[in-house]
């Protein structure tokens, strides 16, 4: 059989900057190379050129795939037969997909009842063992860190260096697409791996945009300066109270001349609806947190801004349906009723 590969895998594309040699096994779904889409409405509102880095365009519809191709490829290179992660959902979906692709097993630990439906569906259909705990992400991560000390299972959370190595390629693409990168990067912060990875990528390319990280008010350990025992937010992806990469994220942000600040759930939801209804961009609530932050605090003199749209809106259909201004209109199947339903005052 002739296999035609339409574009390089992320590892092949950026091999000279990644810890993979020619001939190493590569587990890929052709991740990366995501679109950078102008946001005219947000641009007008903040008085800067704003672009959206659409990470929902990755194979499992979040940025996690950049890191996961590296983490799972490295695990296979080391002979691992199983991977594990704690997750608020997207890491789980990505790990499950890449493990399936590699033909190895995957287990995920998730906070009971707090994972968005699309993410759970993905993780299950890829055949991962989904273990739900009566505890939050932070407890799950502590448990898996201990578990991998006892068993030969590869941990693929962003405490794994390969995850950050893969995710730094998001910054590489921005430097390439924008001829030197933006003045300002706005990014949601949960476990703080992605903001750390972007900074690493920018540094390796010799550019230094300011980083504005945003946490939800009820889950803002890096703003408060201490862990949050019971993190709470509508943006379930970033419902994290004790970020594993917190110190590095704070150092990166400070070095860039930026900051990590908070946005409320109301601000997150307003940005979420605005993005969908005015920009045609359906992202998940955690992603809209960075747009909410940009709208709240302003572009601060930057002329070009990138907001990292970390995950696709379809991940979380419940929030889209429940937190939406509109509703489905029931209608009898006849012309009079249809005219009224379509044209009447809703
Ligand atoms: C859509 O999947 O932590 O600061 O377990 O899914 O690198 O953690 C997800 C995080 C932002 C925050 N946007 O990134 C997980 C998980 C979305 C996310 C973040 C996540 P980090």
Image (cartoon, rainbow, N blue to C red):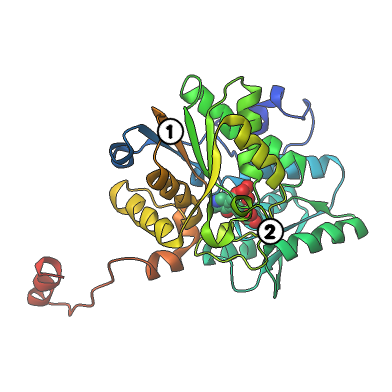
Quick one: label 2, few (<14), some, or many (20+) residues within 10 Å? some
Q: Residue furthest left?
A: 336
Q: Which mark is residue 331?
A: none
Q: Is residue 4 visible?
A: no
Q: Quadrant of residue 76?
A: top right
| First of labels 2, 1 by sequence position | 2
In the image, farthest residue toward the bottom? 332
Q: Answer few, some or many: residues within 10 Å of disc 1's Cα (few below 14, many 20 plus, some between 14 and 19).
A: many
Residue 279: x percent and y percent? 32, 46
Q: Which residue appears farthest toward the right when viewing the image?
A: 150
Up-down relation of residue 338 to residue 73 (above or below) = below
From the viewer's side, name the closer residue of 304 and 333. 304
Q: Which residue appears at 54% of the width and 28% of the height?
A: 173
Instruction: Say which quadrant the C terminus sits in.
Output: bottom left
Task: Tell me, for residue 305, which label it has, or none.
Answer: 1
Task: Pinpoint residue 288: horizontal percent, then vertical percent.
Answer: 44, 51
Is disc 2 placed on a helix, strand or loop? loop
Say above or below: 262 vs 67.
below
Q: Which residue is mark 2?
A: 227
> In the displayed structure, would residue 289 be above or below residue 33?
below
Q: Quadrant of the N terminus?
A: top right
142 vs 125, left or right, is right
Residue found 87% across the figure and 45% down from its top: 79
């Amino acid at each position: 059989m002739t296999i035609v590969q339409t574009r390089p895998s992320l590892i092949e594309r950026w091999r000279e900057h990644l810890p993979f040699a020619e001939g190493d096994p590569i587990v890929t779904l052709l991740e990366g190379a995501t679109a950078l889409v102008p946001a005219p409405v947000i641009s007008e509102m903040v008085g800067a050129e704003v672009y959206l880095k659409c990470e929902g365009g990755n194979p499992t519809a979040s940025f996690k795939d950049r890191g996961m191709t590296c983490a799972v490829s490295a695990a296979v290179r080391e002979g691992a037969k199983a991977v594990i992660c704690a997750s608020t959902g997207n890491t789980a979906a990505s790990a499950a997909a890449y493990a399936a692709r590699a033909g190895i097993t995957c287990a995920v630990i998730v906070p009971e009842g707090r994972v968005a439906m699309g993410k759970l569906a993905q993780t299950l259909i890829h055949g991962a063992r989904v273990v739900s705990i009566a505890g939050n992400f932070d407890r799950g991560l502590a448990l898996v860190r201990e578990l991998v000390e006892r068993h030969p299972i590869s941990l693929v959370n962003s405490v794994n260096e390969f995850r950050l190595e893969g995710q730094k390629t998001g910054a590489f693409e921005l430097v390439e697409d924008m001829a030197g990168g933006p003045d300002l990067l706005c990014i949601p912060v949960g476990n703080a791996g992605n903001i750390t990875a972007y900074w690493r990528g920018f540094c390796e390319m010799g550019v230094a945009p300011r980083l504005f990280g945003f946490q939800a008010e009820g889950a803002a350990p890096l703003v408060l300066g201490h862990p949050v025992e019971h993190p709470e937010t509508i943006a379930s992806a970033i419902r994290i109270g004790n970020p594993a990469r917190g110190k590095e994220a704070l150092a990166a942000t400070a070095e860039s001349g930026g900051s990590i600040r908070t946005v409320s759930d109301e601000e997150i939801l307003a940005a979420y609806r605005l993005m969908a209804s005015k920009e045609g961009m359906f992202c998940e609530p955690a992603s809209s947190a960075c747009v909410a932050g940009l709208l709240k605090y302003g572009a601060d003199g930057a002329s070009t801004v990138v907001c990292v749209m970390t995950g696709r809106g379809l991940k979380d259909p419940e929030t889209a349906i429940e937190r939406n201004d509109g509703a489905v209109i029931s209608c009898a199947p006849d012309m009079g009723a249809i005219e009224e339903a379509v044209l009447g005052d809703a």
